[in-house]
Amino acid sequence: MVVVINGRSGVGKDSLIEFASQELNCRNVSSVDKVKDLALDAGWDGVKDERGRQLLIDLKKALVDYNDLPTKYIIEEYNSFKKSSDDILFVHIREPEEIRKLENYIPCVTLLITRKSAEKYNLSQEDTVTKFKYDHIFENDKPIKESGAEFVKWLKEKIEKI
């Protein structure tokens, strides 16, 4: 199963995936992975503060426009995933147009993670997160063990239907 996972910064996407990885074979990739590598080579300090996040947003947009590197990377990861024994491939993509593009190449479900107490960043990309019609929404407002257990249960039910 391929899950395009999205949500504002700080909603707990990676925490839920870590929890799921305790019971399922999960692979976790982001359309910004290669962008981060290039940003580090260019001198980015790896800090995901507002300035660092904006750098990644701008660099990703340039790479999408230039040669679509982020999507090509995700397709490569998907092809590797298909040959593996992993149960789930989580793909982080922020931009609705990039999610739609990936849906043309890869069978997937889309999932929005929400959390009322998530920190708000003043980034244009954060505003686009909720401007997509997701297949599913998971509210991560409970303590992590409780939310994590519910998340794993939800994932197992989805896997059984495949």
Image: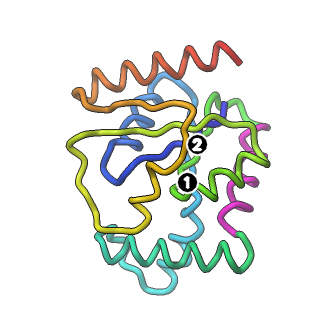
Q: Is 147 located above or below residue 39 in the figure?
A: above
Residue 103: which quarter of the image?
top right
Q: Residue at x 73, y 35 (%)?
A: 84
- Horizontal side of 16 relative to 134 (left or right) equals left
Q: Quadrant of the N terminus?
A: top right
Q: Quadrant of the C terminus?
A: top right
- Horizontal side of 20 relative to 38 (left or right) equals left
Q: Is 14 located above or below residue 1 in the figure?
A: below
Q: CA distance from mark 2 to mark 1?
A: 7 Å
Q: Earlier in the sequence, mark 2 or mark 1?
A: 2
Q: Residue at x 71, y 51 (%)?
A: 102
- Horizontal side of 93 relative to 72 (left or right) equals left
Q: Name the mark on residue 114.
A: none
Residue 53: which quarter of the image?
bottom left
Looking at the picture, which amino acid does disc 2 mark? Answer: Val
Q: Can you identify the residue that label 1 sits on? A: 93
Q: Residue at x 79, y 37 (%)?
A: 83
Q: Position of residue 124 (x, y in %)?
A: 40, 68
- Horizontal side of 162 relative to 118 (left or right) equals right
Q: Name the mark on residue 4.
A: 2
Q: How many discs mark residues in the rendered view?
A: 2
Which residues lie in the magenta part?
69-82
Whether residue 146 is in magenta: the answer is no
Q: Is 35 located above or below residue 115 in the figure?
A: below
CB within 8 Å, label 2 to label 1: yes
